[in-house]
Amino acid sequence: MSVVRRRVVVHGRVQGVWFRDSCRGEAEAAGLAGWVRNLPDGTVEAAFEGPAPAVAALVAWCGRGPVRARVTRVEEFEERPTGAAGFRIT
């Protein structure tokens, strides 16, 4: 199975609603590598690396987020895999 990498920027009410920790949990459960962080403009940015179906599922999850989030838009960017291991909150 091919490894892909996608970076997303998630807009809406996504900070202060456990988005990063929930995202980390979803990524670890799916066996994905990468990271997630808050940006100063109120968005959340994340990168996911792993099998294409699992990455696509996590990008789709970002469109919903955790229960308290109100996602209005997700920007998605294709990137080259880096060989990342583990998933972290930065």
Image (cartoon, grey):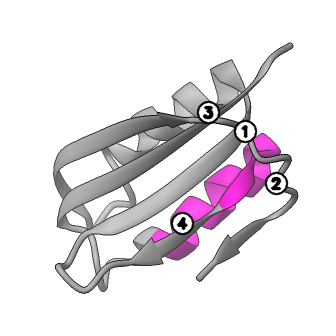
Q: Residues within 10 Å of mark 3 (few under 14, many from 20)?
A: many
Q: Nearer the viewer, mark 4 or mark 3?
A: 3
Residue 79, how many percent across, how many down?
A: 56, 37
Q: Nearer the viewer, mark 3 or mark 1?
A: 1
Q: Nearer the viewer, mark 4 or mark 1?
A: 1
- Sequence-first disc among 3 and 1: 3
Q: Are marks 2 and 3 in contact (CB under 8 Å)?
A: no
- At mark 4, the secondary structure is helix
- Sequence-first disc among 4 and 3: 4
Q: Give 78 or 63, whichever is nearer the viewer.
A: 78
Q: Are marks 2 and 1 in contact (CB under 8 Å)?
A: yes
The circle on residue 55 is 3
Q: Which residue is mark 2?
A: 84
Q: Residue at x 70, y 73 (%)?
A: 88
Q: Which residue is mark 1?
A: 81
Q: Residues within 10 Å of mark 1 (few under 14, many from 20)?
A: few
Residue 3 in the magenta stretch? The answer is no
- At mark 3, the secondary structure is helix
Location of residue 55 by image quarter: top right
Q: Which residue is mark 4?
A: 22
Q: Residue at x 67, y 29 (%)?
A: 54
In the picture, the quarter occupied by the C terminus is bottom right
Residue 46, how many percent across, how many down?
A: 49, 59
Q: Which residues are magenta?
A: 20-34
Q: Distance between the Cα atoms at labels 4 and 3?
A: 15 Å
